[in-house]
Image (cartoon, grey):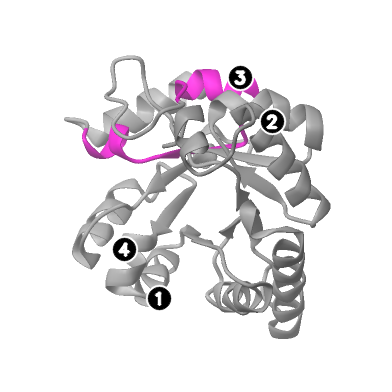
Amino acid sequence: MASDPKDKIIFALDVEHFSEAQKWVNLLKDRVGLFKVGKQLFTHAGPKVIDMVRQKGQKVFLDLKYHDIPNTVAKAGEEATKLNVAMFNLHALGGFEMMKKTVEASKTISKSLRLPRPLVLAVTILTSMDEGALKEVGVQGPLLDEVSRLALLASKAGVDGVIASPQEIGIIRERCGEKFLIITPGIRAPSDKKDDQKRTLTPKEAISAGADYLVIGRPIKEAKDPLEAVQKIIEDIS
């Protein structure tokens, strides 16, 4: 777990072009702990964007949310490990075997290549979903129950932590213990637009509740002064 407040911030590089990603990494490289590379940017730029971030001396959270048959996701996890990212994720809904096999594959390949093993994280329920959205896909139980069940399953499979809404931090801590990492998107200041996020908290509220890392994109990217916005977040969580 990061101890320096700035190292708890993962900036979401949710941009269209490689040049935009470079701009943000150059601007924020000494102000945040990691840079998240998601589906849009990775599909556009591929592994070279990870190389770019690492060449700046920064860490990468590869946010591709793998969800497929166990062998396919395990192989993807091997490739993520070869890219020397600090973290990558998969969907807990892929099941116990998928998660366990991916963790084991990542450990094996990192040992054979003498690379640091990346943290493997599981997505519980996307922060864009609420109980109404869950019911639409056939999940009838309370959202909190579903999140805690998936988090516990991920923990038993050897996953290092979960991506979860800040509003579920308490139940995950209770079920999975203090060493289980919790990475929270859906971070917004009270004055921020919620956009497509349904379950949000402020940075201070999320850290106070027990989050280890905060994934933050639009509140920094859309600020008039992004550096000032980052500094306010650091002060908020210090």
The residue that disc 4 covers is 41
Q: CA distance from mark 1 to mark 2?
A: 37 Å
**Which of label 4 and label 2 is nearer to you?**
2
Q: Along the polypeptide, which appears first: circle 4 or circle 2?
A: 4
- Residue contact between numbered discs 3 and 1, judged by CB atoms under 8 Å: no
Asked whether, in this view, residue 177 is left or right of residue 229, the answer is right
Q: Which residues are magenta?
A: 200-222
Question: Where residue 70 appears, x then y in whole percent?
Answer: 68, 72
The residue that disc 1 covers is 47
- Answer few, some or many: residues within 10 Å of disc 1's Cα (few below 14, many 20 plus, some between 14 and 19): some
- Say which residue appears at 26% left-offset and 61% top-offset: 22
Q: CA distance from mark 2 to mark 3?
A: 22 Å
- Say which residue appears at 30% left-offset and 32% top-offset: 219
Badge 1 amino acid? Pro
In the image, 230 versus 200, the foreground residue is: 200
The residue that disc 3 covers is 208
- Say which residue appears at 73% left-offset and 50% top-offset: 154
Q: CA distance from mark 4 to mark 3?
A: 31 Å
Q: Quadrant of residue 179?
A: top right
Q: CA distance from mark 4 to mark 2?
A: 33 Å
Q: Quadrant of residue 8?
A: top right
Question: Where residue 173 appears, x then y in whole percent?
Answer: 74, 30
Q: Secondary structure at mark 3?
A: helix
In the image, 102 versus 83, the foreground residue is: 102
**Which of label 4 and label 1 is nearer to you?**
4
Q: CA distance from mark 4 to mark 1?
A: 10 Å
> Disc number at residue 145?
2
